[in-house]
Amino acid sequence: MPPSPPQHRILFSEPIIAGRIEQLARVIGGDLPSGFAPVVIGLLTGSFVFVADLVRALARGGVQPQVDFLGVGHYGEATQSSGMVTVYKNLRVDVRGRPVLLVDDIADSGLSLHAARAHVLAQHPLWLRTCVLLNKPARRTAEVATDYVGFEVPDVWLIGYGLDAGGQGRALPYIAILESDQSTT
């Protein structure tokens, strides 16, 4: 039997998350340059749930993006950042001359998003914007633009909706505060 998720309390419920994603999709859809096929790039692994729901919301608004994933990381299985960002999965889609939306689950230190943004910019997209479901500015150590933000969050460890703590809690359908933590990210 798989281990149960760590002790937690819900911060954002499923309906709250779904409603905010619909709002984000409307704004993003309105901002996309017309006449170009956009590319949505999710940062692995945590963003996969958010990317899926955001792409479906964009499609309901008439935007049909191509989707790819970029693997960058500095946590591994730990709950503390190593500070070193590595690209472990590159893009398969050519983004040159195309509008790109770079999507991450959370901007905390900003290291992953900063590195991913630089990686994508080197491939000369027409337009590049970032979208994060969660923004934790108290933890920021790298300068990074967050063009679209779902929610501002406190300086605590969060799990659920793709976010994990040492590999646990990623499948929870909501976002929760890890009870055993008071701010370790």
Image (spheres, grey):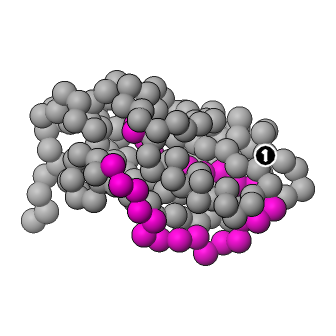
Magenta-drawn stretch contains 95: yes
Going 76% across and 65% down the picture, which residue do you hit? 96
Q: Give residue 28's quadrant in the image.
A: top right
The x and y percentages for residue 159 are 28, 43
Q: Nearer the viewer, residue 97 or 35?
A: 97
Quadrant of residue 19 within the rendered picture: top right
For the residue pair 174 and 48, the one nearer the viewer reads as 48
Q: Position of residue 61 (x, y in %)?
A: 73, 46
Residue in the image at 76% along x and 54% along y: 99
Residue at point 23%, 30% (across, down):
183
Closer to the camera, 65 or 83? 83
Pick the front one: 142 or 108: 142
Q: Give the labeled residue for mark 1.
A: 32
Question: Which residue appears farthest toward the right when viewing the image?
Answer: 35
- Give SS at disc 1: loop
Q: Is residue 70 above or below residue 58?
A: below
Q: Residues within 10 Å of mark 1 (few under 14, many from 20)?
A: some
- Does 159 lie within the magenta span? no
Residue 109 position (above or below residue 182): below
Which residue is rendered at x = 65% and y = 51% of the image? 101
> Where does the N terminus fall, quadrant-wise?
bottom left
The region drawn magenta spans 83-109
